[in-house]
Amino acid sequence: MSIKENLEQVRNEFKSDEKLLEGAFRLEKFFKRYKWVLLFIVVAFIAYLGDTKLQDYKHEQTRERITQIYNEVLESPNNIALQKRLKEVAPELYDLYQFARASERNDANEFKKLSQSSNEIVKTFAKYSYASLSRDKNLLEK
């Protein structure tokens, strides 16, 4: 009986090895058939990751430049050239800066200009501030 059991065990091992080899051959056949497609997918994925990293780097550089310009404007608020540069690079931040200056001086004309801003928050607060300073109840109710 032991020889028969040993033969069965060897046969089962051969069957499992045969299945393993069949799987390896299928995988090799699949790879040969689709290797260019797989290579294209890998290259496209790497290119996508590279592009994403590059875009993130550019955005970070832009943010740093805007922060630097804004800090310079805060240090010298009367420098019109710096204010123009800030307006070109970050118009919404420029509007927020103008709103802060108008709030310090209670400048109704500046609030009126800022009520046309593209920045919704600045626009809303500028309309309210202009209405408050001009004491126009109709504007306050809107």
Image: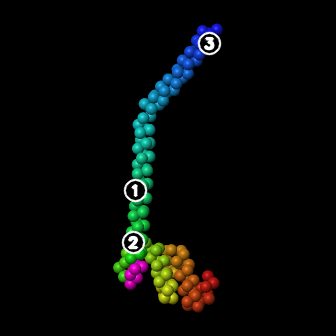
Q: Which residues are magenta?
A: 73-78
The amino acid at mark 1 is Leu
The amino acid at mark 3 is Glu
Q: Nearer the viewer, mark 1 or mark 2?
A: 2
Residue at horizontal 57 percent and vertical 83 percent from the top: 128
SS assignment at label 2: helix
Which of the image's four quarters has the C terminus? bottom right
The amino acid at mark 2 is Gln
Q: Which mark is residue 27?
A: none
Q: Give how far apart the Cα atoms at labels 2 and 3 are.
A: 82 Å
Counting residues from the N terminus, which is met first, the one under dot 1 or under dot 2?
Answer: 1
The spot of residue 97 in percent (x, y) is 46, 79
Asked if one can make out residue 74 in the rendered structure from this viewpoint, the answer is yes
SS assignment at label 1: helix
* Residue receiving disc 2: 68
Above or below, 70 against 42 in this view is: below
Nearest the eye: 137 or 29:
29
Question: Which residue is at the far bottom?
Answer: 135
